[in-house]
Image (tube, rainbow, N blue to C red):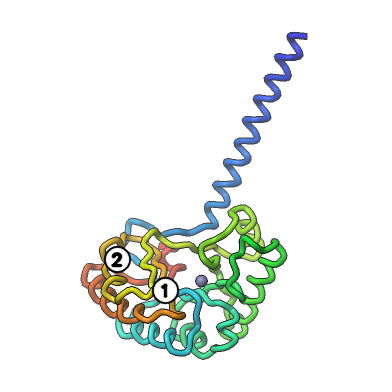
């Protein structure tokens, strides 16, 4: 009787150990799909712009990026690309990176896996149609997601999930341009992926015009998300 108990105990311990290893292995695996920053060893920064394209703001952002010969990454809401395709086509032609930000911009934690896949594929379809390229990057609206579900869908559809570094200038709340710029300049570190918006913001463009030349002077280089994770 005692022997059986001992064997049962050993088997239980082995199973618990194996179970934990699997959970550990799968979370490590998932973590590789989620990107929050690039290498900390180089003075690179990736500026990212969510929720466009917008006929006025996206073009203004592109103008200021071009003024300093800087490349950015645009996470596109598919429905906005349907309404305003031109600024998106322009961004892609001018060498900026285009990412998938769903079609309808829902909180994806409220969707079934099938609905989430549809949201991503519907956005992908219009991005491919307008730019001729399959996007490699996906950013969940509101930074809201269920890790395991999103990781498995991203792997299946061949996306990396791009979040952002802790610096959040909350430009969508329309603080003054100087406040947005200072928040980014005072906190930015090598390899940061900075979250900004090019839809329904007033001061983001002016903030860029302040922070880009100052940070270039400090030795930073602005690159796309794919470039910052590649270096
Ligand atoms: Zn968004």
Residue 48 placement (x, y as % from top left): 43, 72
Query: In front of the other: label 2 or label 1?
Result: 1
> Is 214 situated above or below 168?
below
Q: Earlier in the sequence, mark 2 or mark 1?
A: 1
Numbered-mark total: 2
Instruction: Please name the residue that numbered disc 1 is placed on.
Output: 172
Report whether 97 appears left or right of 24: left
Residue 160 placement (x, y as % from top left): 55, 63
- Identify the disc placed on residue 78: none
Residue 20 placement (x, y as % from top left): 61, 35
Q: Residue at x 73, y 14 (%)?
A: 5
- Identify the disc placed on residue 183: 2
Q: Residue at x 53, y 54 (%)?
A: 32
Report whether 12 appears left or right of 160: right
Q: CA distance from mark 2 to mark 1?
A: 14 Å
Badge 2 density bin: few <14, some 14–19, many ≥20, Cα 10 Å: some
* Image quadrant assignment for residue 66: bottom left
């Amino acid at each position: 009787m005692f022997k059986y108990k001992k064997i049962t105990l050993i088997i239980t311990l082995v199973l618990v150990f194996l179970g934990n290893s699997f959970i550990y292995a799968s979370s490590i695996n998932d973590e590789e799909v989620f990107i929050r920053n690039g290498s900390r060893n180089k003075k690179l920064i990736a500026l990212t712009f969510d929720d466009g394209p917008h006929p006025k703001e996206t073009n203004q952002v592109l103008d200021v990026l071009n003024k300093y010969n800087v490349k950015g990454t645009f996470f596109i809401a598919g429905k906005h690309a349907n309404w305003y395709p031109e600024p998106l086509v322009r961004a892609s032609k001018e060498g900026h990176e285009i990412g998938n930000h769903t079609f309808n911009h829902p909180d994806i934690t409220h969707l079934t896996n099938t609905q989430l896949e549809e949201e991503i594929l519907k956005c992908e379809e219009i991005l491919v149609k307008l730019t001729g390229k399959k996007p490699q990057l996906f950013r969940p609206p509101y930074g809201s997601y269920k890790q395991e579900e999103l990781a498995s869908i991203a792997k299946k559809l061949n996306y990396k999930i791009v979040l952002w570094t802790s610096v959040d200038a909350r430009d969508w709340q329309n603080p003054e341009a100087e406040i947005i710029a200072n928040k980014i300049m005072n906190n930015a570190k090598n390899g940061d992926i900075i979250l900004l918006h090019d839809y329904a913001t007033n001061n983001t463009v002016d903030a860029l015009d302040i922070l880009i030349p100052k940070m270039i002077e400090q030795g930073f280089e602005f690159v796309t998300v794919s470039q910052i994770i590649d270096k």
